[in-house]
Image (cartoon, rainbow, N blue to C red):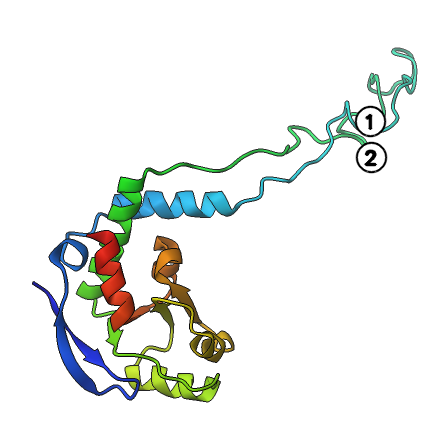
Amino acid sequence: MPKIDVLNIKGEKVEEVSLKDDIFGIEPNEAVVHQVVVAQLANKRQGTQSTKTRSEVRGGGRKPWRQKGTGRARTGSLRNPLFTGGGVIFAPKPRDYSQSVNKKMRRLAMKSVFSAKYNDKELIVVDKFDFTEPKTKEMVAALKALNAPKALIVLDEKDTNVVKSANNIPKVATSLVNTLNTYDMLKYDYLILTKDSLKEIEEVYC
């Protein structure tokens, strides 16, 4: 059973806790993680791009010149794609880019990332962030003590003081356990969990 040190915000070891094997001790499945991330990014695409084809551009109803005898190439409309103001060849149209991934694969991807973070020593467990008020300076000092300059902080419930303290720090973000996703965990070098969020993660993913 994997174990990890629990630190305080000064970077000092407070205790040691055991992690569940089926979340933090599995062999990461890179193929599933890749598929889930690709689907997640695809689902963020709006798909609202749209340009006009020659049939949708205004004008061009009359044949610009006779078919033969002018020395110029034959054409039926000044709105064909070869002319300025004409339509677009193979014009992009609104479409749905979304991809569906089943729940079992999403859970496996999350567990794979948890295990990979633990294996790469990029998982940090903190006893708590006890900020009495929003203080960016205190959060910067805490991250420096934890040696985690680019990190995702995962909370079990929304803590306005912690969220606001992290908001103005580049390459640092916060998330709740119920909104945590594979892409966000991979985007940041370190994953910082509080003891409470670790407990909730083990309850959700077991």
Relative horizontal placement of residue 72, taking residue 55 as reference (left or right): right
**Residue type at numbered disc 2:** Gly
**Residue type at numbered disc 1:** Arg
Q: Residue at x 85, y 25 (%)?
A: 78
Q: What label does residue 135 carry, if any?
A: none
- Considering only vertical position in the picture, is 83 above or below 152? above
Depth check: give the residue in front, 24 or 60: 24
Q: What label does residue 85 carry, if any?
A: 2
What is the x, y in percent for residue 77? 84, 21
Depth check: give the residue in front, 185 or 156: 156
Answer with the quarter of the image where residue 118 lies.
Answer: bottom left
Bin the neighbour count of mark 1 within 10 Å (Cα to Cα): few under 14, some 14-19, many 20 and up: many
Task: State the residue lying farthest toward the top.
Answer: 68
Depth check: give the residue in front, 195 or 25: 195
Answer with the quarter of the image where residue 174 lies.
Answer: bottom left
Give the CA separation, mark 1 to mark 2: 6 Å
What is the x, y in percent for residue 76? 84, 17
Bin the neighbour count of mark 2 within 10 Å (Cα to Cα): few under 14, some 14-19, many 20 and up: some
**Secondary structure under the numbered disc 1 in the rendered image:** loop
Screen quadrant of the N terminus: bottom left
Answer with the quarter of the image where residue 132 lies.
Answer: bottom left
Can you identify the residue that label 1 sits on?
Answer: 79
- Considering only vertical position in the picture, is 140 above or below 64? below
Q: Residue at x 18, y 85 (%)?
A: 13
Tell me, yes or no, whether the two marked residues, 1 and 2, touch with CB atoms within 8 Å. Answer: yes
What is the x, y in percent for residue 160? 47, 75
What is the x, y in percent for residue 87? 76, 30
